[in-house]
Amino acid sequence: MCKVSSLATEGDPKLNKDYRGNPSLMIVHKNNDTVDGKGSSGDKETKLQNVIIDVGKTFTENALRWMPQHGKTSIDAVVLTHEHMDAIAGLDDLRGFQMLPTKDPKTGYPQQTPLPVFSSKLCLEVLKRQFFYLFPKEDGGSSAGETTLADGSKIRRYVSKLDFRVVESFKPFVAAGLRMVPLPVMHGEDLVCNGYAFSVDGGKSGNKTLNVVYLSDISRMPAETERFIMEELPPIDVLVVDSLNLSNPNPTHYTFEEALKLVRKLKPERTFVVGMSCDLFLPHHEMNKQLAELDIKIELAYDGLVVKV
């Protein structure tokens, strides 16, 4: 067992920054955005909404650990980067975080509000195979989680009630009030993965709007995406970027050296690194101590990290 893995087993995970789950981000906001970017700012009465990027293999564990600590009990929209299990494995567990405002008139059981899930078209096709039971039957006779028997009776199972929606590269969409732009990057030369750009409104209180670019899985930045980020987006306040190894090349992820090159090119105010290998990176505090000596603001992210507007 490597040093970081050994440290990750010690003590309470809430206090252990070497204990890391799959990369994921919850965006808590009061935006009231439109696709054209002309939405209004939220005020004190505007409801906070929770948008989460990726629900991987460790989603439930981390959600139960961190959401209650910050007063969060539900999710308003899900945005997926790609179709690997470290991004999608927790889809069915979303049922525990869905609102239950009404009752099913047939069964009397609480009825979930459909939860919007945004992904690329390719990702959606994979989801239909991996999570076939979360989709209505193609014949229209049965809804998600439901089986129709020969006599016409139905067996209902409690599964997530999801509303799947397709997003396209560089075309803005609105997820629970938050305008987001898909940024296609390579995650290995055989897979296009979506990063996302979004801005969290500081509201009418006068707080600064936070412009974020999120790239959790990247091995190569296409020229078109780089141009879009540099020419079409506002200056980046927070960049989240993937880095598996320090310098050893990897076919599906950035090295830290490659991530640094991107940071110097995009010039964000702050950068958080995710997806680090436990074998090649130093323990969290040791590594961040070294990074603090660089001429840019860059640090390893950790589970439970909060960035405030």
Image (cartoon, helix red, strand yellow):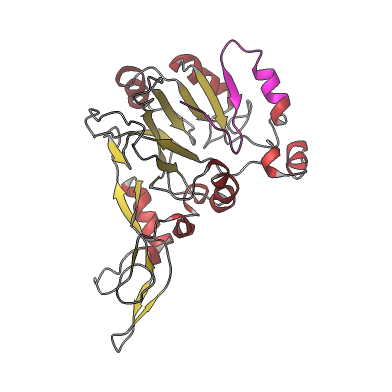
Residue found at x 49% / y 35%: 216
Residue found at x 38% / y 49%: 123
Q: Nearer the viewer, residue 52 or 220?
A: 52
Residue sitting at the far front: 45
Q: Nearer the viewer, residue 195 or 302?
A: 302
* In magenta stretch: residue 308: yes
Magenta-colored segment: predominant secondary structure: loop
Q: Nearer the viewer, residue 84 or 213?
A: 213
Residue 241 visible to an observer of this rendering: yes
Quadrant where the image shows the C terminus? top left
Residue sitting at the far bottom: 151
Residue 5 picture location, percent across and down = 73, 41
Give, as a single range, the part of the protein colored magenta: 286-309
* In magenta stretch: residue 262: no
Q: Quadrant of residue 125?
A: bottom left
Quadrant where the image shows the N terminus? top right
Considering only vertical position in the picture, is 112 above or below 302? below
Residue found at x 44% / y 37%: 27
Residue 14 picture location, percent across and down = 67, 41
Residue 153 picture location, percent across and down = 32, 85
Residue 81 visible to an observer of this rendering: no
Residue found at x 56% / y 29%: 273
Residue 81 picture location, percent across and down = 42, 42
Considering only vertical position in the picture, is 98 above or below 173? below
